[in-house]
Image (spheres, grey):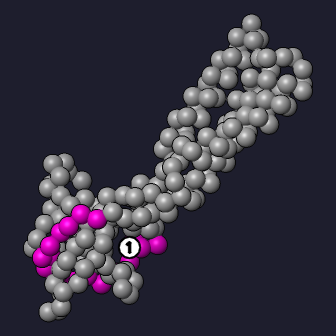
Amino acid sequence: MRKKMNKKIAACGALSAALLLAGCANDGTAYRSDVYWAGQVNQAQEVKTVQIIAVMPARITVDNRRDRSDSATMGTILGALAGAAVGAVVSDSPDAVVAGTVGGAALGNVAGKGMSGRSENFVEGVQITFRYDNKIFNSAQVGRVCEYKTGTAIMVSPAPNETRIQPNNPYGCGTSK
């Protein structure tokens, strides 16, 4: 009975690890122009009207080191738990449990890093060429080309040299926001 229970615990631990680690890669959502940090909410921000004259696809590199570290830590913990359960199933010896814990932690660390992807991820982005104040500028944004179209758009500037051109084609991708 005990061995069956330990096998179930080990299987549940492995499944939990896989599910938790699968969603750890940085998808760039935090860098979108329509995403704000808590400190930017309820704050007056300068807004400008710009004329988008071209929208082109771009690839944006986002840092994934923190997510890899978090995944490695989670993998280590879950691997240690699963390894301890497997060690207990294999033998009643405390040495087997310790060996399983250490081995599981090491494998979990490697698996966590592997499942979270590279230290940098490439996400979908756009290059927006726009006219403002009789000058032409270009700004790269995380987002999809279908969210933007030529014409008038709003640009929020929460900090100097920061351009957050808001999507001006909200239903262009076929779904509502």
Q: Quadrant of residue 49?
A: bottom left
Residue 57 lies in magenta, yes or no? yes
Left or right, 16 with respect to 107, comes to: left
Residue ID at (74%, 23%): 86
- Image quadrant for the N terminus? top right
Q: Residue at x 18, y 58 (%)?
A: 146
**Label 1 residue SS:** loop
Q: Amino acid at mark 1?
A: Asn
Task: Please state if 136 lies on the left or on the right of 123 as rendered.
Answer: left
Q: Which residues are magenta?
A: 39-58
Q: Which residue is mark 1?
A: 42
Please identify the residue farthest to the bottom as the structure is shown. Answer: 134
Answer whether residue 94 is visible to the viewer in this image: yes
In this view of the protein, can residue 74 be seen by the observer?
no
For residue 20, which quarter of the picture? top right
Give the class, few, some or many, for how many residues have Cα within 10 Å of label 1's Cα (few <14, many ≥20).
few
In magenta stretch: residue 75: no
Q: Residue at x 21, y 61 (%)?
A: 145
Residue found farthest to the right: 94
Residue 177: x and y in percent read 24, 53
Residue 95 against residue 74 in the figure, above or below: above
